[in-house]
Image (cartoon, helix red, strand yellow):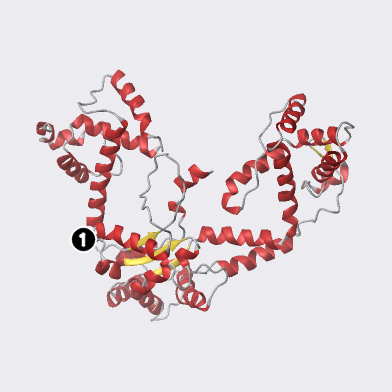
Amino acid sequence: MPNTNLLSDEDDIVEVVKPDCWDLKQFIFLMSIDGYFLMETIWAAKLHTTLQKINVLTDMPKLTDIQTKNSLDMGRILQSDKSYANIINHITLEMKKIMCNDIVKNNRKICIILDESTTLSQKTIKLCWSFLSNTSADSIKHAILSYLAIYGLIDHYLKNNLVAFVSDGASAMLGRVSGVGIQLKNMYPKIIVWHCCNHHLELAVSDILKEINAFNHFQFFNEKLYSLYHQSPKNSNELKMCVGSLKQNLIEIGKIFTIRWVASSEKTLKAVWNNFESLNKHFSNFAIDNLRNSKEISKYSGLLKILASVEFVKVNDACAKENAMFKNVKLATNKSIPKIISSQFFRSLANNLRSRLFTTQASHLSTVNDNQFKEKYIIQLLKDYLDMKNWPDDCDVLYGNENIRRLTNQFQIDEVSFVRRFRVFIDTKNSSKILDLKPLLNAINTVAISSSECEPKIGVQNI
């Protein structure tokens, strides 16, 4: 049985160190339903801190030992990783209920941000997982609605308050015929289906790499390097000897991945950059090694010509004119390597961003519906009628009214009331009056432009 005497005085509770995400009322409520000792609640707060730092629960016994040595009474419960997990599950369940009850009670606008992962990692992360029997659009939609219904976000509430659905461009998510976005749009016509802007940029850059062949030479070169050293311990040891003779540190050369794994590719680029002199020495030595067969000599000679070319290493004009040296390596011209034409690159970037940026479906091209959405909402939002800096010196008597009506209709907010508030805001030019439009501003800000909020913890595991 819990020691209820510890909960009798609210002043005692105020002194408790509690997580930042709990206010006093939530904390008291959690304690009243939780039934744990006061010191155990402090200990749970330490557990919350551990989870914030993405530490596994097995680290908690070490923290417990430290607190015990500091003469802190850790309570009288089993201090195992399973008991930690049970406490966290219990607290998060109650916090979810409190949060969702507040959302429903105050009719707050919500946006669904969705992403997926196939990781099998055992790391502890702060995400709500929903395991699916399959990855069809119907299964994903059913899982979303079922999960929301558990916490009182039922169909009637969603019709009035669900403002947006944001995801990456997977066909199951944003397919134009039966994707999750289309199915939700059919159920809730007012929602905005949005393709993550980060994925737009990623896909646009990927399109550039396909269009401009000059980028391919480095990827081809790196694939040769990877197969040369990763698949042969002998070659790898020889490279280490070259690095040692130059008194440098060897950085392992990995693979060049697609744009989706740009962080891993960055490590490979840095490895080639830092090992440049060592690679040059290794290739030079074995390109003239008579103990090698003709095929190996040809391979090393070809890699050397690519590595030590002006086109491969982007040097400034002064360096190229004087001695064309880079990291103590003499560079030579290699006309077989195509140059990157800056004007072509930026023109391709602009064209691909233009075709990608306002798509709301899995297709890489903007559709008629996408263009209508752009004209109806995006352009109006970019004009930002709610910012005084964008107002003309002589505002028309109806300035911005039509835009406010569109927004209130889209977000299902009282049109007449907010048009009047907007008129008062314009007439008085008093910045404090913008607070009267706060519900509309909150609804606009609820629409996420990126699904990246779902990905950081998954990305940490996959890199």
Which amino acid, by three-letter code, is at mark 1? Answer: Lys
Q: Position of residue 130 (x, y in %)?
A: 36, 53
Which residue is at the front of the view, 86 or 9?
86
Question: Where is the N terminus found, in terms of image quarters?
Answer: top left
In the visual, does 109 lie left or right of 352? left
- 339 above or below 351? above
Q: Residue at x 63, y 41 (%)?
A: 267
User: Quick check: can you spot residue 432?
Assistant: no
Element type where label 1 sits in the image: helix
Q: Quadrant of residue 52?
A: top left
Q: Can you name the residue that lies furthest to the bottom here? A: 397
Number of numbered discs: 1
Q: Residue at x 27, y 45 (%)?
A: 92
In the visual, does 7 lie left or right of 302? left
Q: Residue at x 47, y 54 (%)?
A: 452
Question: Where is the C terminus found, in terms of image quarters?
Answer: top right
Q: Position of residue 394 (x, y in %)?
A: 45, 77
- 450 above or below 125? below
- 74 above or below 315? above
In the visual, does 14 lie left or right of 301? left
Q: Which residue is mark 1?
A: 105
In the visual, does 93 lie left or right of 136? left
Q: Residues within 10 Å of mark 1 (few under 14, many from 20)?
A: few
Q: Quadrant of residue 364?
A: bottom right
Q: Position of residue 356 (x, y in %)?
A: 57, 67
User: Quick check: can you spot residue 233?
Assistant: yes
Which residue is at the front of the view, 389 or 443?
443
Q: Residue at x 84, y 54 (%)?
A: 336
Q: Position of residue 456 (x, y in %)?
A: 46, 47
Which residue is at the front of the view, 23 or 363?
363
